[in-house]
Image (tube, rainbow, N blue to C red):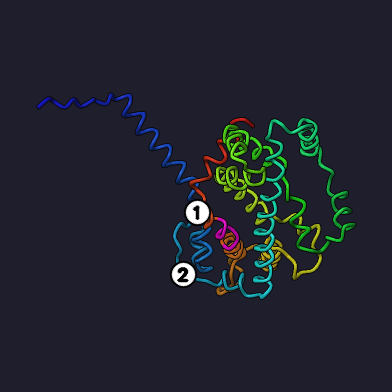
Amino acid sequence: MGKVSVKKISWSDLSLVITSYGLVFLVCVIMLYPFMNVIAVAFSSHTAFLKNPLMIFPQDLNFDAFRIVFSSPLMYKSYGNTLFVTIVGTVLSLFLMTLTAYPLSRPELKGKKIFMTYYLVVFVFSAGIIPSFLVMKGIGLYNTLWALIFPSILPIYYLILMKSFFESIPNSLVESARVDGASEIHTFLKIILPLSKPALAAIGLFQAVLYWNSYFQGVVYIRDIDKWPLQLYLRQIIMAADAAFSSAGGNLAELEPDAVPAVSIQYASLIVVILPIIMVYPFIQKYFVKGVMVGAVKG
């Protein structure tokens, strides 16, 4: 029976491994601490926050901040508005993006350079907020949820990324499908789209986050309060909490013992906003890195 050789690790290699793990651990701590502090403060009482505002675990468990955030029926209405904008906007965006990017990725498309030049000009030179507002009002979308969807429905950067991903798919697959008698629509639906799941998942997540965090469009295009997206409702809660804080002279200790500090309401609002998006990540994580990297190689 032959001897099993064991490779010795040199001190330089060992020190490199230890340093690498140490740096990764340090980065994890730096990234996790703010999030843990937000959760701890949101679930802690006013007295506990005054004693230790830098806490990482909840102390004297208290849910008053969340009670205030969820106290108004407008909260659920704004949540529904944001869900509608996010889901419908992301689906429509992916639909238009794939239908636009696939023809641009085909070498036989005539005038492809002209189309790409047009999209690049639109990408670089924005019309500005006033022309956009006048267009939205002119076509009757002002003060509707569609005004939150249409301005971001076809982002040129993601269109170029999707086009690059389609170009990375071997052309021989398309030619084989044509030889077998498949139409362009059948080839696109049955061959191209199933192979594009990583890009669709990654860009779909980017679009969903964009619509979910949409704030500025709501300020500009929405007038009625029952059509507010979630971000505008949370802004109102935070402004009300700040007003109470200012009335106490900017001193948290001057508030009533059972009062909820503005920072607790702000942190509770942060949790309410980011929790649904965080819950989406694990389901598409396996597509995320591959979709972004493959689409960016030829970009």
Residue drawn at point x = 51 percent, y = 54 percent: 35
Q: Which residue is disc 1 drawn over?
A: 283
Most foreground residue, 162 or 215: 162
Q: Nearer the viewer, residue 132 or 113?
A: 113
Nearer to us of marks 1 and 2 is 1
Residue 222 occupies which quadrant of the picture? bottom right
Q: Is residue 225 above or below residue 39?
A: below
Which span of residues is magenta-colored? Answer: 272-277
Crowding near pointer 2: few (<14 within 10 Å), some, many (20+)? some
Q: Residue at x 52, y 45 (%)?
A: 287
Q: Where is mark 2, residue-wise? A: 61
Residue 17 left/right relative to 193: left
The kind of secondary structure the magenta stretch mainly shows is: helix
From mark 1 to mark 2, how far is it between C-alphas?
31 Å
Which percent across, then down, holds residue 264? Answer: 57, 64
Q: Residues within 10 Å of mark 1 (few under 14, many from 20)?
A: few
Q: Is residue 19 magenta?
A: no
Res. 223 in view = yes
Disc on the earlier residue, 1 or 2: 2
The foreground one among 163 and 30 is 163
Check disc 2 and report its element: helix, strand or loop.
loop
| Magenta region includes residue 276 | yes
Residue type for callout 2: Leu
Q: Where is residue 80 in the image (x, y as percent from the top left)?
A: 66, 67
Q: How many marks?
A: 2
Quadrant containing the N terminus is top left
